[in-house]
Each structure stands twice: as C-alpha cells, then as structure tokens.
Image: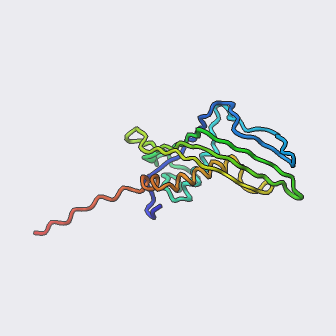
Amino acid sequence: MAATGTKPLEFHKAIVSMDSGTNFGKITGGWLNVQWGSFKVSPGEEPKQFIAIGIEELRRAHYTLPGDSNKLFGDDSAKARYELGAEITWMQLDVHLQAGWVKPTIASNGAITVKWQVYDTVGKSVVFSRTVDSGFHQVSKGDSGEPPLFGLFRSNVRLFLASPDFAAFMRPDPAPSQPAPAHD
C-alpha cells in the first residue's frame, strides 16, 4: 500500500458458516494411508486464531489499523471507519503424516472459500464484497511451520489483500485541494 497508509480498517470477525459437525477433511498416516481422524466444524466456535492471522497479514501489507501502535495499553477511542469481516463458506483440508528418521513429514492439501466484506460504520452498510477461492499445499517436517488449518486461511487472506479491486477501494481518498489565494 501507499506510504500514507490506507483508509482506517479493523478486523474483528471471522466466522465459519458451514453446518456444525460437517466433515471438511481427513487426517491420514503411514505408507498405507490409514485414516486417523477427520476435521469437523465445531458448533458456535469462532476461530480467534483466524483474527490474529488476518491482523498480522494486514500489518504486513501496511494497512492502517487504528490503535494498532499501542498494543500494551490499548486505545479504545481509536475507531476505524471500516470493518473487515470474513465468512468461511466452504473448506476442505486433508493432512497426511509420514514417519521419518528424525521427524515426520506433514503434507497438507486443501482449498477454502471466504466471502470478504467491508462494512462502513458511518453509512451502516456493506460497501465492498468479494468472494475468494484459494488452494493450499504445504509440506513440513515435524513441528515446523504453522498448523495446516491456519496456513489454509492465511493463503486466502494474502490472495484477498493482493486483489487490485480491494487495494483500490482501501486507498485513502485524495485530499481536498486548497483554493488558490485570491490576488487583488
């Protein structure tokens, strides 16, 4: 983003709108691909880690997050005009663990669909909406890297933030031009 930042933005909400109990992937292991478990949507669970990932990626992309500079004490008086929300409408994630000599190899493959919306707190309406579909593939050793579910979401956040239409929407409005001084 521009050196001057962006329109002020907050990210506080990410929800999974899939039905509770929906199976969205499996965990397998070994040379025989034995199924060890599955991923299921938990009822009423709001993924707080998704919020942290979103904020982290917004910071990295240099978006203006009011009150962000003072995390130790906070500043509730700094409110952003725009609020970003993420609705996860679909996801699939398969993880395979393969034993190794020192650490296991974890191979993850998935896809996710997120409906991103920007809400104008002054106009009290959604002013920007975009649905982003993204794929995900990650291979890591043992406990290195972030958990695959979070990597799946992070890949979608990055794709959304890189979209030219969102970047154009978030650019600050041009400063009003000053009238030229009158000459007598």
Which residue is the extreme one toward the bottom?
A: 183
Q: Using residue 140 as the reference point, say whether residue 19 is left or right of it.
A: left
Which residue is the extreme one toward the right?
A: 101
Height in image: 89 above or below 181? above
Residue drawn at 63 percent across, 42 percent down: 48
Q: Nearer the viewer, residue 111 or 171?
A: 111
Which residue is the extreme one toward the left?
A: 184
x and y, in percent, of residue 181 in the image: 18, 66
x and y, in percent, of residue 38 in the image: 76, 38
Q: How is the image coloured?
A: rainbow
Residue drawn at 54 percent across, 47 percent down: 132
The quarter of the displayed image where residue 50 is located: top right
Q: Using residue 110 as the reference point, say whether residue 82 is left or right of it.
A: left
x and y, in percent, of residue 24 in the image: 69, 38
Q: Nearer the viewer, residue 52 or 99?
A: 99
The quarter of the displayed image where residue 87 is located: top right
Q: How many marks?
A: 0
x and y, in percent, of residue 128 in the image: 44, 45
Height in image: 184 above or below 31? below
Q: Quadrant of the C terminus?
A: bottom left
Residue drawn at 45 percent across, 64 percent down: 3
